[in-house]
């Protein structure tokens, strides 16, 4: 995926770990915040989106997910690494711009699909890690 001359560009990107939000501002003046959960369930990866229409995989139990790394990909995208091990999505500036622009609509659709499937945002199990 190569950057397009008309593609939106990110002016600022900041992850607020305590709020689990990625704050973005674009060269066209659009600004917004996306939660780590939102970014995880709308990952552009094949693992989430599938390889074609109708192959999408509904993501569940991601309410508490965190971003643990943000890796630049050229001048047109970032790779987000999540604490659940997901790291295969490349988030282009245009894709992030679209997510912010359509956030309310996308979230309504996502929660409706969860409800229809009888599934939830919270993880079914809690994993505790400790050192003896």
Image (tube, grey):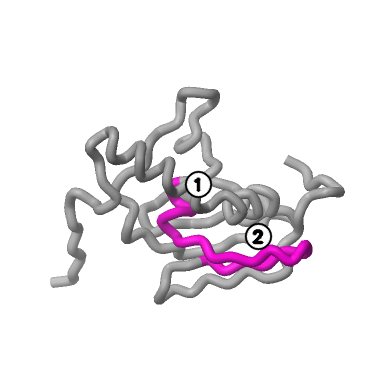
Q: Is residue 113 magenta?
A: no
Q: Is residue 91 left or right of residue 16?
A: right
Mark number displayed over residue 34: none
Task: Report the front residue among 47 and 38.
Answer: 38
Q: Quadrant of the C terminus?
A: bottom left
x, y percent for residue 93:
69, 54
Measured in 3D between alpha carbons, the distance from the residue under mark 1 to the one under mark 2, in whole angstroms, is 28 Å
Q: Is residue 91 left or right of residue 74?
A: left
Q: Is residue 62 left or right of residue 94?
A: left
Q: Which residues are magenta?
A: 22-41
Mark number displayed over residue 105: 1
Residue placed at 35% from the left, 40% from the top? 112
Q: Quadrant of the N terminus?
A: top right
Question: Residue extending furthest left?
Answer: 132
Residue placed at 25% from the left, 53% from the top? 122
Q: With respect to residue 27, does 120 lie above or below?
A: above
Task: Describe the element under mark 1 as helix, strand or loop.
Answer: helix
x, y percent for residue 4:
82, 45
How many residues crowd mark 2 within 10 Å: few (<14), some (14–19), many (20+)? few
Question: Residue extending furthest right?
Answer: 5
Residue placed at 32% from the left, 61% from the top? 64
x, y percent for residue 85:
39, 52
How many residues crowd mark 1 within 10 Å: few (<14), some (14–19), many (20+)? few
Q: Is residue 32 magenta?
A: yes
For marks 1 and 2 on the same chain, the one whose residue lies earlier in the sequence: 2
Tally of marks: 2
Mark number displayed over residue 72: 2
């Amino acid at each position: 995926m190569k950057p397009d001359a008309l593609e939106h560009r990110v002016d600022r990107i900041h992850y607020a770990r305590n709020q689990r939000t990625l704050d973005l501002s674009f060269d066209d003046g659009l600004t917004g915040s996306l939660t780590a959960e939102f970014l995880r369930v709308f990952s552009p990866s094949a693992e989430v989106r599938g390889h074609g229409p109708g192959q999408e995989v509904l993501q569940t139990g991601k309410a508490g997910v965190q971003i643990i790394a943000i890796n630049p990909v050229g001048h047109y995208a970032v790779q987000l690494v999540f604490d659940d091990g997901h790291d295969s999505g490349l988030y282009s500036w245009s894709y992030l711009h679209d997510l912010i622009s359509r956030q309310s609509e996308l979230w309504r659709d996502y929660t409706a699909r969860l409800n229809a499937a009888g599934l939830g945002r919270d993880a079914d199990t809690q994993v505790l890690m400790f050192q003896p």
